[in-house]
Structures are given as C-alpha cells and as structure tokens.
Amino acid sequence: MNRFHFTIAAAAFFVVLVAFVAAPPDNARQQGSTPAQTIATAPSDVQKTNDAWVAKISKQIEGHEQEPAEKVFKNIQIPIFKQVPAGRFLNIMNHGYSHALGVTCTHCHVETDFASDDLRPKKAAREMAAMHLAINQQLAKMENLAPNPQGHFINCSTCHRGAVDPMAGSN
C-alpha cells in the first residue's frame, strides 16, 4: 500500500463524522438514565454501550452495509467518509473514534437524532478531523524521517490515548 493510500486509510479509520438516526438500544440504558446521561467508568462499559448502539444501527441498515455511508446515513460531512461502506463506517466510529477518546456514541451524537449537529463535541471532532488530515498530509511530504513501510501518520489515539482531554494526566 503506498503512502497516500495508507494515509487516507488511516484518516478514514480515525476521522470523524457520521449522522444516522437511531433510537437508543434497550440494553444501553441504566436504571433512571439514558446513554447520554450515563457516565461509564470502565472502558469495557463504554465499549459494551457502543457495541449495543452499533448492533441496533446495523439492524436498521441491514442489506445496505456495502453501500456508501453518505447514501445510508444522514449528514456525513467529511469527504473521505462519504464513499466508505456503511458497515465499515460504523466500525470506524465504534473502534476508532469512540475508542480513541474513551467515550460512548452519545458523547458526540444526540441520542434521538445522530444526524444533529447540536453537540459541541461533534463539531470539535470535525475540526480535529481536518487538523488530523492536514498533519498526515504534511507527514507524507517529509523526506528526512526514518523509513517506515506503513508510512508516517497520526490518528486520534496518538494524542487522546483513550481520554477526551489529551492533556489529562500530563504534568
């Protein structure tokens, strides 16, 4: 895989923005709260919640998993995600974005309208995606870095490492 394609693949795996309409999965609720209100403290709790969302949405898009995400979901604004197969797009959001920040889907998405742009974290994620792509484009141009067969690139985890605030825990 050449450097350009790898950079695009890395960007597609870790860049953000989807908008799909979905009701919350039944098992994502804790007594008296919704997933948006629930703060899961263990990474496994966060992943279980996100897996429940993905399962629910996967059922809704059944038969359309190989279609471009922009045809299946609403409000896809990041160009590299528009042609990604919808099924893969769900995996990018679940195992890329949410995992890199250690958050549930409803950190960025309005629980009753995933297409909504009402939440600040979703807008911030789009800005971070643009920054991420720009950094990877610069890295691809650098000639004096040590050779790396996979190319040089960053992703959300490079800075966030499972935390919303990349500066959390630093001195």
Image (tube, rainbow, N blue to C red):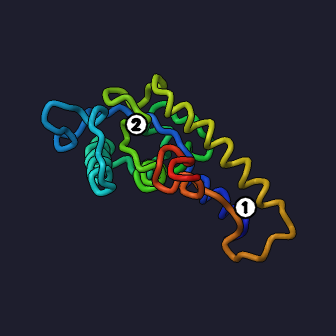
Do the numbered discs 2 and 1 sit on residues whose CB atoms are within 8 Å? no
Report the residue that reaches farthest toward the front: 171
Q: CA distance from mark 2 to mark 1?
A: 31 Å
**Residue highlighted by disc 1:** 4
In this rendering, is residue 146 above or below 133?
Answer: below
> For mark 2, what is the residue?
107
Q: Which quarter of the figure is the N terminus placed in?
A: bottom right
Give the secondary structure at mark 1.
helix
Please tell me which residue lies in front, 123 or 37.
Answer: 37
Q: Amino acid at mark 2?
A: His
Residue situated furthest left in the rendering: 31
Picture coordinates of residue 118 (x, y %)?
Answer: 46, 22
Residue 62 in view, yes or no: no
Farthest residue in the right direction? 143
Residue visible at 32% across and 48% down? 50
Q: Nearer the viewer, residue 14 or 22?
A: 14
Q: Please, what is the three-letter code of the amino acid marked with disc 1?
A: Phe
Is 45 positioned to the left or the right of 80 in the image?
left
Q: Residues within 10 Å of mark 1 (few under 14, many from 20)?
A: some
